[in-house]
Amino acid sequence: MAERLVFPPIVEGLFVRGLSGRVTPLLKEQLRSEGLDLDRPLLPAYSLESWIRCVTLTAKALHPHEPDEVAWRMLGERMIDGYRDTLMGRALLGVMKLLGPWRMLSKAQHGFRTSNNYTEVRITETGPTEAEVWLNEPGMLRYFKQGVMLAMSRAAGGVAASVEVRAFDEHCVTYRVSWKDSGR
């Protein structure tokens, strides 16, 4: 497989928009040492390894008293909050609200591919307002994507949306995604 890359929309959503005013000078310098210079225009892509190191540093710096899983999930939610402030994000999240949770899930493969070149998605319907979602997401990024999917489910109109990590290994994760209204 080609090098796994993360694209600017997700980087901008988290670091430029979602964390605006929260990145300390020390964290900014640490991110720069990992290849993310927030004082320059974003690169066309970042290696997955660099992205993971940057999210790790940020989770520890901004949420030092939270368990790692919670800190990473919170950053995933924050990324969607920031992504909403980008041109692409406004358009995508506006459409998701019209689609509802089920159709949002059916478009997940395409949505994740706007942020990276590697995500694969498999969705299995397990009930009228519930699905299992499998992603080939490595390591702790499973919790970041948990936060992303939770925020996206809410944005798609999922009332009382929930995203639980059901099973995982170092290379993939399965979530249970549920909500109260059918959204179909």
Image (cartoon, grey):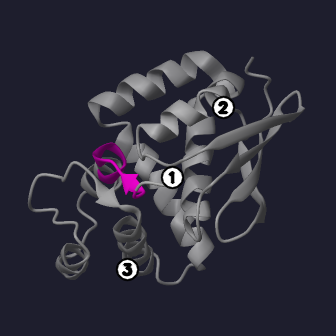
In this rendering, does residue 19 appear at all?
Answer: no
Q: Earlier in the sequence, mark 3 or mark 1?
A: 3
Q: Looking at the image, which residue sits at the far front?
A: 1
The foreground one among 113 and 127 is: 113
Helix, strand or loop at mark 3: helix
Whole-percent x, y for residue 157 in the image: 63, 27
Q: Which residues are magenta?
A: 3-11
2 or 1: mark nearer the eye: 2
Residue that appears at 78% across and 26% down: 181
In this rendering, does residue 149 appear at all?
Answer: yes
CA distance separating discs 2 and 1: 16 Å
Whole-percent x, y for residue 120 in the image: 60, 44
Q: Which mark is residue 61?
A: 3
Kind of residue at badge 1: Glu
Give the residue pinned by disc 2.
105
In the rendered image, the vertical position of residue 96 relative to residue 25, given as above or below:
above
